[in-house]
Image (spheres, grey):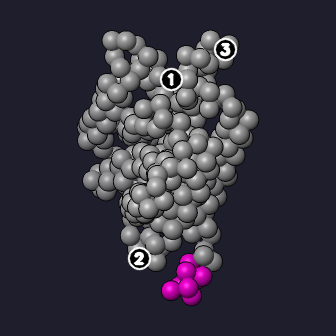
Amino acid sequence: MIEKLGMYLEYPFVRYALIVGVLIALCSSLLGVTLVLKRFSFIGDGLSHVAFGAIAIASVLKLTNEMLLVLPVTVISAILLLRTGQNTKIKGDAAIAMISVGALAFGYLLMNLFSTSSNLTGDVCSTLFGSPSILTLTKKDVVLCTVLSVLVIVLFVLLYNKIFAVTFDEAFSRASGTNANAYNLLTATIIAIIIVLAMNLVGSLLISALVIFPALSAMRLFGSFQKVTICSAGLSVICAFTGMLISILAGTPVGATIVAVDVAAFFVCLVLGKITGGVH
């Protein structure tokens, strides 16, 4: 098995997949803790469906670079979702459901009405659940992902104290002069970028797992925001790396395998949390 893995790692596309997967998992976990604590976990789910709709439009328009359309549309949707979720008449969960279901339905409808592929079912399945092959990543994808991931990590580290304050007590943060709307907007924009990057890896239906499971797993073991964030980041990277290695060796779908490892890690943390007497 080790020899087989070593043989696979000699190929650039395998190394590209591992690098991109680890970076995406790391960024997702950092923001995941904030989203879970703010009861906004499924913003990733809603925005991933928006990205699916944007990909459908890009396919109909036959754009050579889908990112030029998908990224701006997803970021704008994140801003609109945040604004709509603050509306007293349309709560956050309702706003996510509206955008999520609507974008998914229109995207699939467009792909059926203006199909440009002879394998529509395969294209839809790959978009929803991630590409079954890790051969789709190019050096350009790796460079783009690395630059955006480093940007996300740097912003999170520099703004850690503000993000912490807004996450736990937004009203107090506003009273103390912090522009809570700006930080909420920044969080939504960053998660939108991550979702677009993760589409090829895990697909639009599984992206939320990268955001939710590491954070929930870490919360079973620790009680402080800092410890949960660090543990979540470590778990996410380990699960993503392990999931991709299993996928390479066993020939299973990348996205589904990563999520399966995340689920297994959650139950392990749940048991460890009970044995050690809860959070620390």
Q: Pinpoint residue 115: horizontal percent, then vertical percent.
A: 30, 44
Which residue lies at the image location 62% right of the left edge and 30% below the top edge? 163
Q: Earlier in the sequence, mark 2 or mark 1?
A: 1
Disc 2 vs disc 1: Cβ atoms closer than 8 Å?
no
- Report the residue marked by disc 3: 176
Residue 180 - label: none
Dominant SS of magenta comes to: helix
Q: Earlier in the sequence, mark 3 or mark 1?
A: 1
Q: Residue under circle 1?
A: 79
Q: Which element is circle 3 on? A: loop
Q: Residues within 10 Å of mark 1 (few under 14, many from 20)?
A: some
**Amino acid type at mark 3:** Ser
Please name which of the two marks, 3 or 2, marks the residue nearer to the observer: 3
User: Which residue matches tag 2?
Assistant: 250
Q: Image height check: is 149 above or below 156?
A: below
Q: Is residue 217 magenta?
A: no
Of badges 3 and 1, nearer the viewer stands 3
Question: Which element carries disc 2, helix, strand or loop?
Answer: helix
Residue interval drawn in magenta = 1-8
Above or below: residue 26 compared with residue 114: below
Callout 1: SS? helix
Sequence-earlier tag: 3 or 2: 3
Q: Position of residue 261 (x, y in %)?
A: 43, 63
Horizontal side of residue 141 vs 272, given as left or right: right
- Label 3 with label 2: CB-CB less than 8 Å: no
Which residue appears at 62% of the width and 60% of the height? 19
Distance from Cα at disc 3 to Cα at disc 1: 24 Å
Q: Which amino acid is tagged 1?
A: Ile
In the picture shown, does residue 146 fall above or below 39?
below
The one nearer the camera, 256 or 136, is: 256
In-image side of 65 versus 251 (left or right): right
